[in-house]
Image: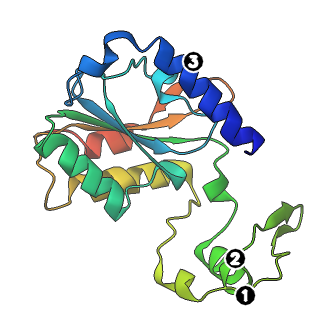
Amino acid sequence: MGQILAEVLAANQSYASSFGDKGSLAMPPARRFTVLTCMDARLDPAKFAGLAEGDAHVIRNAGGRASDDAIRSLVISYKLLGTREWFVIHHTDCGMETFTDDIIRGLLANSLETAIIDESGWHDVGQSPGSTEAAYIDWLTIQDQVQSIVEDVQRIRFHPLVPRTIPIYGFLYDVRTGKLIEVPEATAIGRAS
């Protein structure tokens, strides 16, 4: 057994031993809101948004982007589980700012192994064959954090399956201070009507 697997299983055993009555939590989130944010390990939505188990839905992906799958999850969140407010939260110093669609496509075309980055940019060091499938994916890279939040709130707000009654808030999480900084233009677009 690998070290990481052993650590995860030990942590789970400890968690399960004090699970208490959490097994009786209702499926719909108690506080009736959803957070769409980045998968970055420096972000802990439970801490920065004051969440306990059962409070809210948290959807995470690379960049916290409003991808088709994220919108699918948001729609299920409100339609079947009753959420009433949504937060789109990107963050400073995001890895999605370090490359473009062309860069990731080129790296994947060369190799499926892990790439490296240095002062001159991303480099593929893999020897295995790559894939051209990357050309068919919109990687939703980020060139401007504030603009990407505005675009994501706009994409969600004007999606045909999203009701106008749900407020959508746009925020930037600062990884250096832990503070949420509102993006007023995004929140204005996301205003409920």
Q: Secondary structure at mark 2?
A: loop
Provide residue 108's location: percent of width, then percent of height.
Answer: 67, 79
Provide residue 25's location: percent of width, then percent of height.
Answer: 25, 20
Residue at the disc numbered 2: 112
Residues marked 1 and 2 touching at CB (< 8 Å): yes
> Which dot marks residue 14?
3
138, above or below 117, in the image: below
- Report the residue that reaches farthest toward the front: 1
| Residue 179 visible, this orientation | no
> Which dot marks residue 129?
1
Locate residue 33 relative to residue 179 in the image: left or right. left
The amino acid marked with disc number 1 is Pro
| Residue 121 visible, this orientation | yes
The quadrant of the rendering that contains the N terminus is top right
Q: Earlier in the sequence, mark 3 or mark 1?
A: 3
Q: Nearer the viewer, residue 88 or 137?
A: 137
Provide residue 167's location: percent of width, then percent of height.
Answer: 21, 37
The quadrant of the rendering that contains the C terminus is top left
Q: Choose mark 3 or mark 1, whichever is in front.
A: 3
111, above or below 24, in the image: below
Q: Residue at x 63, y 71 (%)?
A: 100
How crowded pointer 1 is (Cα within 10 Å; few <14, some 14-19, many 20+) is rated as few
The amino acid marked with disc number 3 is Ser
Q: Secondary structure at mark 3?
A: helix
74, above or below 182, in the image: below
Q: Earlier in the sequence, mark 3 or mark 2?
A: 3
Q: Residue at x 78, y 68 (%)?
A: 115
10, above or below 136, in the image: above
Provide residue 90's location: percent of width, then percent of height.
Answer: 50, 43
Residues marked 3 and 1 touching at CB (< 8 Å): no
